[in-house]
Image (cartoon, helix red, strand yellow):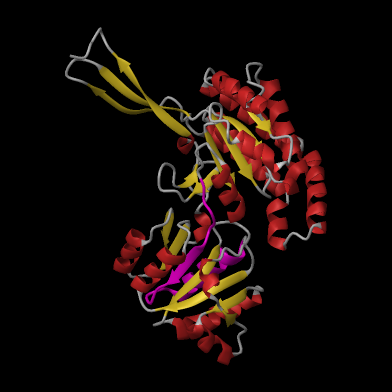
Amino acid sequence: MLELARRAKAAARGLARLTAAEKNTCLLAMAAALERDAAPIRAANALDMAAGAAAGLSGALLDRLKLDDQRIAGMARGLREVAALPDPVGRVLDERTRPNGLRLQKISTPIGVVVIIYESRPNVTADAASLCFKSGNATILRGGKEALHSNQAIAASLLAAARAALPAFPGDAIQVVPTPDRDAIRELLSLTQYVDLCMPRGGEGLIRAVAECSKVPVIKHYKGVCHVYVHAAADFAMATGIIINAKCQRPGVCNALETLLVDAAVAPAFLPALARELRARRVELRGDPATLALLQPAGIECVPATEEDWSAEYLDLILAVRIVHGVGEAITHINQYGSGHSDSIVTADEPAARRFLAEVDSAAVYWNASTRFTDGGEFGMGAEIGISTDKIGARGPMGLAELTTYKWLGFGQGQVRG
């Protein structure tokens, strides 16, 4: 781990010498390589999928692990989108001239060496490598053992393409931790003289374990407990479409809906029909007493929710449902039980929506839209490296700009301080 980190630090210095055009040349070559190497990448992924099924991974987790032609094409598209974005390094963020003539500039700079620890989703290998590379950061990737073959195949394709496209490419700018040993991560995250930042992506257990053992700064989101609140002035058809998309499109991702709040004023007219739609899509419903009293007499299967359900990230076709009285109660519930990730209100009442947007304390808050939009690609950032629910530094989807820090430059003519 020490040697890995030392090489990454040296590579970060090499990255600082690359121009935007050189970085983009590498990224475009990497994108073409992923498409060209789709067959071996799929074959490597098939090994991981078979092992995952044998190990009893849930359907949602297997979906996160799976790579098909469409997802490989999506990784390549993400690389091209990153190449098309402006270089985030060297932007002038502030500029001023002091009364003594000293001119100051605040400019964006790379963070340095970034460790990415992630589970299940092998597309993170391409996303993280491309974003760190474009922003001038060396990256050390440590994927989960369940995606070992997939991650190695993707990284090999990226590195071979970059080296062929640009002789000046620092060969250690993208490295993969070669061992699944957890002690290796603890060692790596103790090397504060070489490693500048760690970003874990995965389940709450992984993120807490990393945050507790790391001696370097960690940007994290523990889990995605996302809400949709159907207000009394909601359009029922709109609300139904948003809820089904947020819950059912990809239930195993962090921006999927986990808790539905329905205003008591419209619950009798809205909730039974919605519940039938959800049950038809095999969604298990867990309701509060008011929800049970409404659905069970109508013959709609719904089990009692426990206190733990309100803060649960299911990552599966399970939905907690609660009836609330007004926007204030909805906001209180979300701020108490939510994870600060993504929450949405469905309403035609602008004052209610504005209050929700202002008072819900989350990284992304929506009015009449699905929580599934909390994503770097959907926000126009290109591929994202993660979604932060921290309040200091980056918050929400993290793209190129969020992978830079800054420094001050001073331009003088012999000024000295009196």
| Residue with the most extreme top position | 414
Q: Which residues are magenta?
A: 220-249
**Apparent side of residue 209 relative to residue 367 in the rendered image (left or right):** right
The percent position of residue 97, horizontal first and vertical second, equals 23, 20
Residue drawn where x is 18% and y is 15% of the image: 100
Front in this rendered view, residue 394 or 75: 394
Q: How many marks?
A: 0
Q: Is residue 388 left or right of residue 206?
A: left
Quadrant of the rendered structure where residue 233 is?
Answer: bottom left
Whether residue 391 is visible here, answered yes or no, is yes
Q: Quadrant of the C terminus?
A: top left
Closer to us: 331 or 153: 331
> Is 339 placed above or below 191 here?
below
Up the image or down, 356 lies above or below 27; here it is: below
Residue 80 in view here: no
Query: The N terminus lies in which quarter of the figure?
Result: top right
Between 133 and 202, the one nearer to me in the picture: 202
Q: x%, y% of residue 412? A: 27, 12
In the rendered view, does 354 fall on the left or right side of 285? left
Which residue lies at the image location 46% right of the left edge and 73% below the top edge? 261
Residue ID at (23%, 11%): 416
As for residue 267 lying within the magenta part, the answer is: no
Residue 266 spot, x, y in % from top left: 42, 81
**Relative image position of residue 57 (x, y in whole percent):** 74, 59
Is 233 a magenta residue?
A: yes
Relative height, residue 282 to residue 360 (above, below): below
Name the residue furthest bottom: 297
